Image (spheres, rainbow, N blue to C red):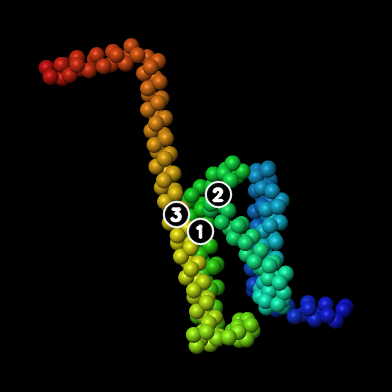
Amino acid sequence: MDLTLKAFLTSWEWRPGVALVVAGLGVAYIMGWRRLRVRKRGAVKSWDVVLYLTGLAVIVLALFSPLDTFEASLRNEFVHNLQHLSFFAAALVYWWPLINPAPRLHGHIPYGFRLVYVFAAVGPVMLPAMSIAFFARGVLYPSYTTVPRLWGLSALEDQTSGWVLMGVLDGMIYAVAFLLLVAAMLNREERMTRLREAIDVGTTRSRHDKNPRKDVRRRDDIPLMKGHMEH
């Protein structure tokens, strides 16, 4: 085996516990995907499992790979652009079900699902940010130590303040998205209620138009009934 390839493979930081969790997620998803495909043909597609496994591969690459993509993005313009393109693609994939820009393509996505979707994303975003901000004992990226210091902050203090700022802003974004979804859900429920009431009124009127004599009889019977009640 080539010495460079051997050094690259042996430099990966394999963590058995994390690897088992990632492998378990992959196996569980594939089993569920196969069962759903057998029960509901056409409900799930092959690219669903491909995208999921690709996401797991990216997680493995980020956790175990010796490649320092952040430092590489500072030195290489292509890697830098690729990094930002991946950010945009990930944001597009995440926010697409929340915004639901193409209801004709995949139908209306229930607001209850969207609310759970937003709430479930808070933990994976906030926990790493707060953990790095308050429990990191050293600078994560060497480039932090080489840039000029601003406002008298050390590299570690700059890193901590940056992660706190990102965590707070992310939390605010998710909170605003959650509140907007709640408002949209209530607005939709109100519109659906008005629509159902309008349909009921229209149905009642159409029945009366078809049987006008019966309606007249009922209205003529009202004074008679009142008279009987008075007596």
> What residue lies at 43% left-to-right and 39% top-to-bottom?
192
Frontmost residue, 44 versus 73: 73
The amino acid type found where label 3 is placed reads Leu
Q: In the image, is residue 77 above or below residue 120?
A: below
The amino acid type found where label 2 is placed reads Asn
Q: Residues within 10 Å of mark 1 (few under 14, many from 20)?
A: some
Q: Which residue is mark 3?
A: 180
Q: Which residue is mark 2?
A: 100
Q: In the image, is residue 83 above or below residue 210?
A: below
Residue 209 lies in quadrant: top left
Q: Quadrant of the N terminus?
A: bottom right
Frontmost residue, 117 versus 83: 83
Q: Which residue is mark 1?
A: 118
Residue 3 placement, left or right of 198: right
Say if mark 1 contacts mark 2, CB within 8 Å.
no
Q: Residues within 10 Å of mark 3 (few under 14, many from 20)?
A: few
The amino acid type found where label 1 is placed reads Val
Q: Quadrant of the C terminus?
A: top left
Q: In the image, is residue 221 above or below residue 53?
A: above
Q: CA distance from mark 1 to mark 2?
A: 13 Å
